[in-house]
Image (spheres, rainbow, N blue to C red):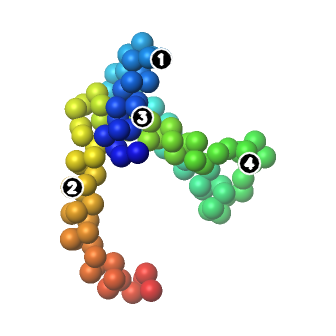
Amino acid sequence: MDLQHAQKTVDDWIKAHGVRYFNELTNMAQLTEEVGEVARIISRRYGEQSEKESDKNKDLGEELADVLFVVLCLANQTGVNLQEAFDKKLDLKTKRDHNRHHSNEKLK
C-alpha cells in the first residue's frame, strides 16, 4: 500500500467509524503519547533498562502502527500529501547523505 492509499484508508475509516478527526493539537498529543509507548518498548527490550513483566507482551509493531495512524490523520487534516513529501525527502536524503554515510568511519 502506498502512502496515498494509506491516507485514504484512514480517512475512510474516520468517516465510517469516527465522528470526526480529533483536532490537530489533540492528535499531536496522541502522536507524542504513541511515540512514548514505542520508546518505552525499545528502551526496555533493546536498551539497557530492564523490561517489566507487564511490558513483555507489548507489541512493537502495534505501537508503530499507532504512530503511523496518527501521522496519517495529521497529514489528512492538514492537507499534506505524504507520498509526495516522502518521495521528496527520500530524494533529498539520497543526494545529501549517500557519500556522507559511506565516508563515516563510525559506520564501518
The image shows residue 98, relative to residue 59, as above or below, that is below
The residue under label 2 is which amino acid type? Lys
Query: Which residue in the protein does label 1 denote?
Result: 17
Q: Is residue 91 left or right of residue 13?
A: left
Q: Where is residue 41 drawn, in percent x and y?
A: 62, 50
Q: Say whether marks 2 and 3 touch (CB < 8 Å).
A: no
Pointer 2 or 3: first along the chain: 3
Crowding at dot 1, Cα within 10 Å, few <14 / some 14-19 / many 20+, comes out as few
The image shows residue 86, relative to residue 73, as above or below, that is below
Mark 3 secondary-structure assignment: helix
**Which residue appears at 28% of the width and 76% of the height?**
98
Which label sits on residue 88? 2
In which quadrant of the rendered image does the N terminus lie?
top left
Residue depth check, mark 2 versus mark 3: number of the one nearer the observer:
2
Pointer 2 or 1: first along the chain: 1
Pointer 2 or 4: first along the chain: 4
Residue 105 visible in this rendered orientation of the protein: yes
CA distance separating discs 2 and 3: 21 Å
